[in-house]
Amino acid sequence: MHQSAWQKEILRISVVTGLGLSLGWSVGYPLIGLMAGLLISMAMLLRSMAALYRWSYRQGPPPQDSGLVGYSVDKLRRREKNLKSKLAQQAKQLRRYNQGIESLHDGVVIIDQDGHISGFNGSAARLLGLRPEDAGQPVTNLIRVPRFTRYFNNGDYSEALQFDVTQRTTISLQVQITQFGLDQKVMLIKDITERKRVETMRQNFIADVSHELRTPLTVINGYLEMLEDMDLPAPVKRATSQMNNQGLRMKDLVNDLIQLSKLESAATDDMGDWFDLSRLGHSVVDQVRSLAGDRIRFHSPVTCEIQGFAEEMNSVLTNLLTNAVKYGGDGTIDFAIESFGDSVKVSVRDHGPGIPPEHIGHLTERFYRVDDSRESSVGGSGLGLAIVKHALEHHDTALDIESTLGKGSTFSFIISPERSRLKISASA
Ligand code: ADP
């Protein structure tokens, strides 16, 4: 086809110039005849090209030409037709995707690289109270929840975020952001109000039961302690001693349960107050000295204040240090509060037997213990690291656990620069 278009074009030029030449020859001016033939060929070509030009601007019918121009027009028209049908197919597919997204029960918001909303579905509009004119606005202007702003700007979307919004009623939402393309984001929003309600009921139930258990336990433990001091026959003494131990364990468990439910139900939009973390570190080392002796090496080259909740942080450090004492063998325990860029890094490292890797991801679950039989002799409720996890969430951070079998474990977390003020300590 391509070949024949060229051939036709050349044939046409040859015929016209040939005719011109022979006419010129017959009247004695072959050169002029040749020129005239060439000019006519060029004129014909130009006419087709002009028609092609007009047609390309949609200002005229397609050129009727059997040569190269005609062939090109033919090709272009076929390509245009293919393209149109592909575009129609894609538009149809896009409509189907949009209908699918629109029909989702969960909210979907597309956010561009500048953090502006570029689209959202009906569920997102309902859950976040968005109006059509909100497209193009920064997402942090429309979701005015400090925790969401921090989560969005932080850029770490490995975990979902939960927060409450109030429109006509207060609803609980869970958002999860995923990045795609060139720093664009898609945000999925779930309504978890019902789930939260059931969760709150469960928390309240546990908190109430724990509170109710506290008084009878105190009475029982008091009498048991009294019995232990009395001169009783050996078997009775053994029994009272065991009851006393279990009673104290139960007291710890109840206290941990109360602490955990308090942490779970605490308002999380509050950033807390500034306090001296280094001083708290020293005080916790003193608190656990009765258990640890001089095994803890406290290293704090910075004096730092952090914004948060001192009581919760006290609980975090106490739990990590007592765990290192209980499970970290007999070696030294390195406890450090140090600068980490503009952040503060807190770490507790022991040189104990370590934790098998398959357990590490579960340690912060309630009542999770690596070896129940061994650890029930050590004491502990299995709630310590769950308390740590929740308390750290209130400080916008998470526990990192590294462990090598036979070498020891390191439990650490990082407090972000927004929550920390550092000074190099004079004693460093
Ligand atoms: P517990 O009250 O049993 O100490 P935790 O939640 O504090 O509960 O810890 C959960 C489990 O994690 C422990 O039972 C123990 O198996 C394991 N664990 C915690 N800290 C360490 C550590 N430093 N070394 C080894 N195992 C640890």
Image (cartoon, grey):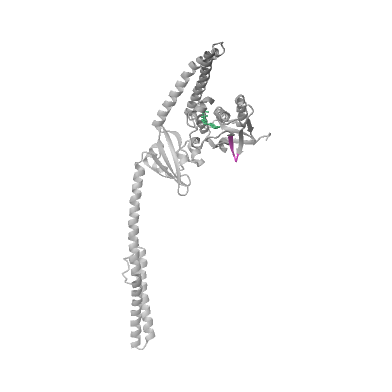
- Whole-percent x, y for residue 247 in the image: 51, 19
- Whole-percent x, y for residue 66 in the image: 31, 71
Up/down of 131 relative to 37, above or below: above
352 displayed left or right of 257: right
Magenta span covers which residues? 340-347
Q: Quadrant of the N terminus?
A: bottom left
* Residue under the image location 36 percent in, 66 percent down: 54
Frontmost residue, 46 versus 365: 365
* Residue under the image location 48 percent in, 16 percent down: 216
Assign the magenta stretch its main secondary structure.
Answer: strand
135 displayed left or right of 356: left
Q: Which residue is situated farthest in the front direction here?
A: 234
Q: Can residue 169 be seen?
A: no
- Whole-percent x, y for residue 11 in the image: 34, 77
Q: Which residue is situated farthest in the top direction here?
A: 231
Frontmost residue, 307 versus 289: 289
**Magenta span has 126?**
no
Count all numbered tags in the image, as a single digit: 0
Q: Quadrant of the C terminus?
A: top right
Q: Which residue is situated farthest in the right direction here?
A: 427
199 displayed left or right of 426: left
Up/down of 316 relative to 71, above or below: above
Frontmost residue, 48 versus 292: 292
- Whole-percent x, y for residue 172 in the image: 42, 33
**Magenta span has 344?**
yes
Up/down of 92 relative to 424, above or below: below
* Residue under the image location 40 percent in, 37 percent down: 190
Q: Can residue 133 be seen?
A: yes
Up/down of 200 relative to 189, above or below: above
* Residue under the image location 32 percent in, 57 percent down: 85
Frontmost residue, 156 versus 94: 156
Q: Quadrant of residue 7?
A: bottom left
